[in-house]
Amino acid sequence: MAATPERRRLESGIEVETVYGPAHAAEREPPGEFPFTRGPYPDMYRRRPWTIRQYAGFGSAEETNARFRYLLEQGQAGLSVAFDLPTQLGYDSDDPRADGEVGRTGVAIDSLEDMRALFAGIPLGEVSTSMTINAPASLLLVLYELVAEEQGVAPDRLRGTVQNDILKEYVARGNYIFPPRPSMRLTTDLFAYCAERMPSWNTISISGYHIREAGSTAVEEIAFTLANGIAYCDAAVAAGLSPDDFGRRLSFFFNAHNDVFQEVAKFRAARRLWATIMRDRFGATDPKAQMLRFHAQTGGSTLTAQQPEVNIVRVALQALAAVCGGAQSLHTNAFDEALALPTEHAATIALRTQQVLMHEAGTTETADPLGGSYYIEALTDELESRARELIRHIDELGGAVTAIEQGVVQERIEDSAFRWQQEVERDERVIVGVNRFRTDGGAPVELHRVDPALERAQRERTARVRAERDAQAAERTLTEVASVAATEANLLPSMREALRARCTVGEICGALREAWGTYDQQRA
């Protein structure tokens, strides 16, 4: 008698059968047709390959500008800005709470002077730029607009994305400033501002990436991301915006993990589920408002400090999953990121990984190359079904904001992360070089190090901005921001004038802290 095959499950809990067949694969609509399971565009990468958008930012604006220029010279098509922790939390570089963190995890941006230096010599009318910034997203977007204005580029010519996804900060990343509800007001203010002034700008990148990095499963990544998307749409509708209008400017940001087949199916399931939500729940009739367009980044949490060169293989497989799943843009992590910010050498290998996929691997020849695979189609259906059920549970609790305030989402992610770690420690889940196939020693890896003198220079520049500006204009415009915060008017025009008067990001966030208070999740 033949032995009974062992039962196998994915980290999402889906049981995987030994063989899949025709019964698992229903016929699908072509790419470019509702519900866009097979991709948002009929010919996908045959028409235009995905955008190579490598994430970069460290030290000073000048250093990051040099890295941007290098990446553009090496064939990158779009920019992606990483900001340091003080900027993300709305503190200036000379704030005592910023000590030791300036320029460490990204570039320090305190004022218009910094943003001007960041994009010096880069024509903003010709590149698209993504900015990973959330709580102070409105301020960084307006700074970008002001630099473009100085270059003679009109706002309606600017293309790019601002992350602006504050809800995932409360559940996965922790870089929030204000309580959830005034933070949602900032999000929808940005929607309305861009609808009027920057119609080609993607106003939000609703992010599953950080949810997965925090330890969620693939099902939870889909469900919690789309539940947050529903909350943003509800807020936009309540603010009087049309789903067909704001829906066209929504974008998403997903993680690409190691299980190639599950990841491809995850992207397909998310597209199908979101299209149905936009049509049936919000009444969107414009296909562009129903499409889920997404940026992908390979999984930072999958990178290992042990045998770091093995990460090159992991990143290549994850990138292949993102491309086979139909990503519109992609960042590939550098192999040394478990140890430090990437060196130029490591960043070049990450860039070349995408270029090999694009030009040598046949990935641009046909749309949805794994579509019709019995396994992929079965996984797509199962992931969609489980994510839909989890979204229904969030709805029953009162929606994403309420579920976050109650800690339900956070607890679910923590449980999944704990379960994963237990499996690794019990050797039930193999991590090459960590719990199996270990080696002793190994060649040392060159690490990128941020010069501590850069922090001192950044503090001096910010102090100089305050000393040289028109103090009365700065005070007047800052007071206006605080006044508008007490009303229901859009905050971004007053922020623009304050930044133009050379107020700093920290000063404006400070005015909003006075108006709205701050959020402490441990005490909420």
Image (cartoon, rainbow, N blue to C red):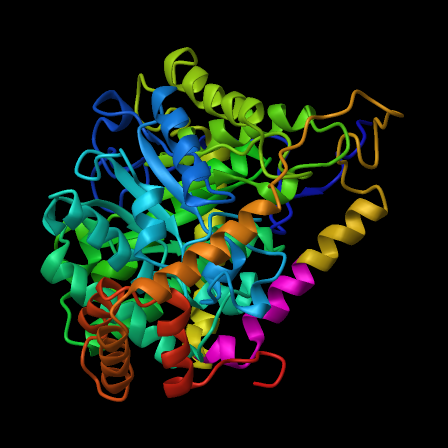
Residue with the most extreme front position? 468
Q: In the rendered view, does 323 fall on the left or right side of 449?
A: left
Please tell me whether residue 326 is drawn above or below residue 492 in the rendered image: above
As drawn, 190 above or below 456: below
x, y percent for residue 476: 23, 80
User: Is residue 387 located in the magenta-colored stretch of the structure?
Assistant: no
Frontmost residue, 519 versus 279: 519
Toward the viewer: 360 or 392? 360
Residue 414 part of the magenta segment: yes
Quadrant including the C terminus: bottom right
Judging depth in this view, the residue of 377 and 425 nearest the camera is 425
Question: Which picture quadrant has residue 243?
Answer: bottom left
User: Magenta stretch: dominant SS?
Assistant: helix
Q: In this image, 22 relative to 434: left or right?
A: left
Residue 248 screen position, x and y as percent: 19, 53
Q: Is residue 5 left or right of residue 510?
A: right
Asked if residue 12 can be seen in this view, the reply is: yes
Residue placed at 82% from the left, 22% from the top? 442
Residue 26, quarter of picture:
top left
Question: Which segment is the magenta one?
Answer: 402-416
Identify which residue, 328 or 477, lies in the foreground. Answer: 477
Q: Position of residue 263 (x, y in %)?
A: 50, 39
Give me the residue at 29% from left, 25% from top: 49
Of all residues, the one furthest to the right in this rendering is 440
**Residue 165's spot in the image, x, y percent?**
39, 61
Q: Hey, which quadrant is residue 237 in on the image? A: bottom left
**Quick check: 49 above or below 128?**
above
Which residue is painted at 39% across and 36% down in the image? 65
Residue at (14% x, 75% y) in the render: 240
Is residue 21 at least partly visible in the picture? Answer: no
Say which quadrant the N terminus sits in: top right
